[in-house]
């Protein structure tokens, strides 16, 4: 019986720094003006700040929706009298409706 040949061993060399590329445009050569105008392309994402911004924006949209919803309920009622002299409650309306 013949023994199985041993597989060749490959030496893994540590990767050089130039082979690594950072995500985004941090590794690209750009002007200072471009970096000043577009800092979000070069700064590492900050997850707590993103979460705070998402919650804040969501609360603002919810508050605007709440204000819109209660506006319908705030239309004032007034007592109107028809031509026959009967009084009834009527909701104020805009002339634009």
Image: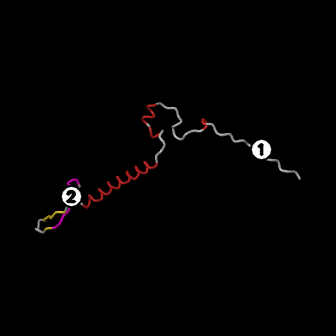
- Relative placement, left or right, of 25 versus 8 is left
Instruction: Tell me where residue 18 appears, x and y as whole percent.
Output: 60, 35
Instruction: Tell me where residue 51 appears, x and y as whole percent.
Output: 43, 51
Work out which residue is located at the far front of the displayed protein and give it: 14
Q: Which residues are magenta?
A: 88-96
Q: Is residue 82 above or below residue 51?
A: below
Residue 43's disc is none
Work out which residue is located at the far right of the displayed protein and give it: 1
Quarter of the figure with the C terminus: bottom left
Residue at 28 percent of width and 59 percent of height: 70
Q: Is residue 37 above or below residue 50?
A: above
Residue at 55 percent of width and 39 percent of height: 22
Closer to the observer: label 1 or label 2?
1
The CA distance from mark 1 to mark 2 is 88 Å
Quadrant position of residue 63: bottom left
Q: Earlier in the sequence, mark 1 or mark 2?
A: 1
Instruction: Tell me where residue 26 appears, x and y as whole percent.
Output: 51, 37
Q: Looking at the image, which is closer to me, 72 or 34?
A: 34
Residue placed under numbered mark 1 in the picture: 8
How many marks are shown on the rendered structure?
Answer: 2
Residue placed under numbered mark 2 in the picture: 93
Q: Verify whether residue 57 appears in magenta.
A: no
- Mark 1 crowdedness (10 Å alpha carbons): few <14, some 14-19, many ≥20: few
Q: Verify whether residue 93 appears in magenta.
A: yes
Residue at 53 percent of width and 36 percent of height: 27
Secondary structure type for disc 2: loop
Q: Looking at the image, which is closer to me, 13 or 72?
A: 13
- Mark 2 crowdedness (10 Å alpha carbons): few <14, some 14-19, many ≥20: few
Secondary structure type for disc 1: loop
- Relative placement, left or right, of 61 versus 42 is left
């Amino acid at each position: 019986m013949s023994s199985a040949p041993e597989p060749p061993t490959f030496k893994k060399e540590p990767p050089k720094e130039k082979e690594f590329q950072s995500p985004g445009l941090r590794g690209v050569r750009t002007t200072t003006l471009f970096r000043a105008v577009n800092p979000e392309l070069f700064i590492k994402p900050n997850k707590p700040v993103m979460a705070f911004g998402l919650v804040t924006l969501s609360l603002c949209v919810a508050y605007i929706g709440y204000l819109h919803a209660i506006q319908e309920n705030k239309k004032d009622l007034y007592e109107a009298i028809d031509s026959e002299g009967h009084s009834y409650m009527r909701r104020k309306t805009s002339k634009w409706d």
